[in-house]
Structures are given as C-alpha cells and as structure tokens.
Image: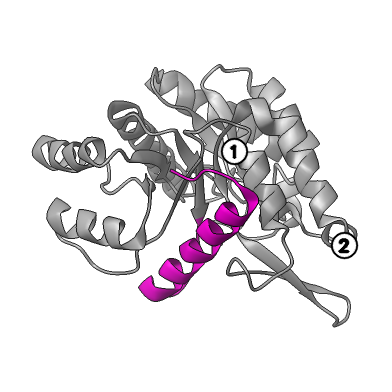
Amino acid sequence: MRIGGGIEKPYTNPDEWIALVKDLNYSAVLMPVKYDATKEEKKDYLDYINKYNLVIGEAGVWRNPISIDETERKIALDYCKKQLTLADELGANCCVNIAGARGEKWAGFYKENYWPETYALIVDTVRDIIDSVNPKNTFYTIEPMPWMTPDTPDAYLKLLKAVDRKAFAVHLDFTNMINTPYKYVYRTEFISECFEKLGPYIKSIHIKDVTMREVYPCSIEECMPGQGTVDYVKVLRLTEGLGKETTAFVEHLDTYEEYKVAVRYVRGIADTAGVTII
C-alpha cells in the first residue's frame, strides 16, 4: 500500500513540491495541479511522480453539483468534469467529490439531503459527469459523509448499482460514516464491514482517527492518527489486502509538521504489524 496526505506549505513549482513530498515520506500524492494547469506544468509534475515512483491517489473536486443555486450547480458540475478529465489524463487512481447538499452550504446537513428526488438527482448527476468525460484511466468516486448519500457501506453499494457506470467506484472514508454511538463502539467491526462490502470497488482511502466524548447527546469527532481509538493494525492490514498500489491518505490536519507526525505514526504501526508501505 501507499501513504500520502496534505502538505500545508506553499509551493510554486514542481521542484519545491517534490522536496516537500520527499520530506513528508509520501509514496502517494494528491493531484498537485488543477485542470487549468498548462501542458508544461502537468508534464513537469508528472515527470517527478514517475521519477520517484509516486502514485496520484486522488484528484479532488470539493464542489456541490446538486446545489439549490442553479448557477452554483452548473459551475460545480463543469468543475467536476474538468477535474475528472485531468485525473484521467494524469492517471490518478480516482477523482473524488461528495454527492452534494441541498442547502446553502456545499457540504451541509439538510433534511432535503435524504429526499427521494435528491437521490435521483445524485444518480443523474454522477451519470452526467461520467458520460461527459468517458474516462479510461481513472474513476469518479463519492466520499461518504455523515449526513448525505452514501453514509453506510450498503448505501454505497446501492448507489453503485443505481448509477450503473463502470467508471463509478468507491472512495472510502470510514471515519465519516462512524456517525452514531453504536458505530463508534463497534468501530472495528464497522471498518471491517466497509472493506468486506466495498473492497472490490475501492480506489483510495482516507485513514483518519476518531474519538467520542461523553457529552449529551453525543459528540463524535475525527482526529489525527494515534490520537483516537481506531485500530490501525486492522486498517492497514485491510488496506494492504486491496493491493500494493492502494492509496491511503491522512487529512484535515492543520500544519506541515502534523502531517509528518501522522505519517510517521502510521508507518510505525505498519512496521510493527508487518504491513508493507511503499
């Protein structure tokens, strides 16, 4: 398996970028450019990726293609297609977005997120994105979220079947789906369920930690690997079982140094567990 994460330090060219990537000890990287990069910029980054045996795990979108604002929706949809095209061009494992939200916030929680007509819109939107690009070298994926489709492994399987496109696959974020006390206390079993059901379709993974505070009604929060209660030996063995090119990313950390600490922790667990991280 491979590991990567964010950078949280500015870079202005491929030389600066690869120096940071090497210092962070990443073997997987997030897409370092956006769709509007020049041909020369794309080539320069790709040359370093090939030279240092890296894999682009994800090209991010992070827009709301089902926005209630029609102008915002069209802009987001266009961006989805352009980022998927970029991911296909540069051979990323996947292009990842969320399904979207039916409210003012692009990733917000709304009752309308669960309406049947919203589900139909998500299916049609994902089909439109994939059919417009027709990717050959990558996949469009949806990151699970606590309060929108898909929020369980079964919901993801249902969405895969509904969309019915070969280029639609899975981005796994098990932490985002640990959204009830029951799932939290049975987190190890739940994570195993995620891999068991979604394994054949997984293209990239977020490996955040999680903790729950004893407040009412409850508070479940993600955190840096090693600061929560996730069984990383289990997670890394399950990830390794998907293949050596499977990419796993730490995310949502505030500083460059935190990313170094998190990756060092994960690599240390892997060494103890006999898991190979390239």
Q: Amino acid at mark 1?
A: Glu
Residue 56: x and y, percent? Answer: 36, 40
Residue 183: x and y, percent? Answer: 85, 56
Residue 270: x and y, percent? Answer: 57, 53
Residue 67: x and y, percent? Answer: 54, 48
- Between 212 and 235, the one lying in front of the other is 235
What is the magenta range?
A: 250-278
Please indicate, yes or no, whether residue 173 appears anywhere in the rendered image.
no
* SS of the residue under disc 1: helix
Q: How is the image coloured?
A: one colour
- Between 140 and 192, the one lying in front of the other is 192
* SS of the residue under disc 2: helix
The numbered mark at residue 264 is: none
- Which quadrant would residue 95 be assigned to in this image? top left
Q: Which residue is mark 1?
A: 240
Q: Residues within 10 Å of mark 1 (few under 14, many from 20)?
A: many
Tell me the chief SS of the magenta region: helix
Residue at point 84%, 61% (across, down)? 180
Task: Give the Cα separation between the discs numbered 2 and 1.
Answer: 24 Å
Residue at point 58%, 28% (across, down)? 169
Residue at point 80%, 40% (across, down)? 193
Please give left or right for residue 262 compared with residue 89 in the image: right
Residue 116, relative to residue 223: is it above or below?
above
Residue 103 belongs to the span the image colors magenta: no
Please give left or right for residue 5 compared with residue 227 in the image: left
- Which quadrant would residue 153 be assigned to in this image? top right
Q: Which residue is mark 2?
A: 185
Q: Amino acid at mark 2?
A: Val
